[in-house]
Image (cartoon, rainbow, N blue to C red):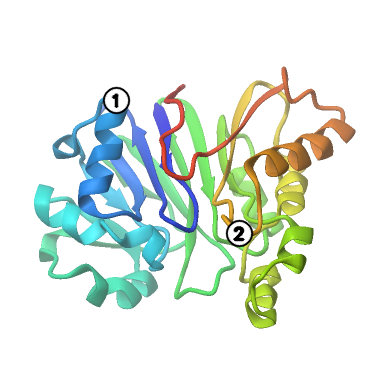
Amino acid sequence: MKFCSLSSGSSGNCIYVETQRSKFLIDAGFSGKQVEKLLTSIGVEAKDLDFLMVTHEHGDHIKGVGVLSRRYDLPIYANYGTWMAMGNKLGKIKEQNIQVFRSDHPLEVRDVDILPISIYHDSAEAVGYVIESQGSKISVLTDTGFVSEQMMEHLRGSDVYLLEANHDLKMLEEGPYPPELKKRIRSLTGHLSNLDCGRVLGDLVRGEGEHVLLAHLSEENNLPGLAHQTVCDYLTVLGLDTSKDILLEVAGRYLPGEIIIL
């Protein structure tokens, strides 16, 4: 498999995945034209995509979904709750391109096994994705305020983790957001902090060369270096060498990261 975070953050989110017989996006939170440019920058043409997966209906995840589906006749996969919440935001979609799955039930799309796992976010029915193909496993988990043991069991054993490190608690508390918004971000249906991310990874990674991407950083309440250092410090206490045991990076806000080849 090939995996690349094209963009990650409150400004827009888009992930590219390629298998032997499939090319697809998880979310498309920019305009169709911008997503096309992001793809071109890693040597992929949007016309070669096979389908789109959606995590939830917030604009930074679906802005370009409808346009891309119409332009390239792409099926869109999302659960019922997300379809009900985003349907009128996408514009007209061909009936055959409206693909509905059940959360927490595995589905097979072309040569990809996908498990959409229920997460904790203030949206209709948000999910993360566990993707398996050709003996490799990728987990994508952002926009959740809590990670349950059941979720952990689904994520465990991945070769790549893209995991939310949304905010630094001190920056959030001292920042300009109104109290209600701060409360929402800290809640069980909000977002994971840097320290939360470190704790989750501490229970997941085996130190066997896994790729870890810290994602969905807040522009106002976090810094890439701070997120990286906080997670590194936590994992180091557990005995992991983040320069050898795992490959730890921060997903770019506007530019694609490296293409990870599994």
Q: Residues within 10 Å of mark 1 (few under 14, many from 20)?
A: few
Separation of residues labelled 1 and 2 (CA atoms): 39 Å
Task: Rate crowding at label 2 as few (under 14), some (14 to 19) or many (20 or more) other CA atoms within 10 Å.
Answer: some
Of circles 1 and 2, the one toward us is: 2
Where, by quadrant of the figure, is residue 155 drawn? top right
- Number of marks in the rendered image: 2
Residue at 79%, 23% (x, y): give it.
241
What is the x, y in percent for residue 100? 29, 64
- Position in image of residue 66 (x %, y %): 20, 61
Which residue was labeled with disc 1? 20
Q: Determine the image quadrant of residue 42.
A: top left
Q: Amino acid at mark 1?
A: Gln
Residues under numbered marks 1 and 2 in contact, where contact means CB atoms less than 8 Å apart: no
Which of the 4 image quarters holds residue 228? top right
Q: Horizontal and vertical percent for residue 128?
A: 50, 54
At label 2, the amino acid type is Glu
**Is 99 or 51 nearer to us in this picture?**
51
User: Which label's residue is closer to the chain start, 1 or 2?
Assistant: 1
| 138 relative position to 82: left or right | right
Q: Residue at x 41, y 34 (%)?
A: 256
Tell me residue 156's x, y (percent).
Answer: 64, 40
The reply to whether residue 258 is visible in this rendering is yes
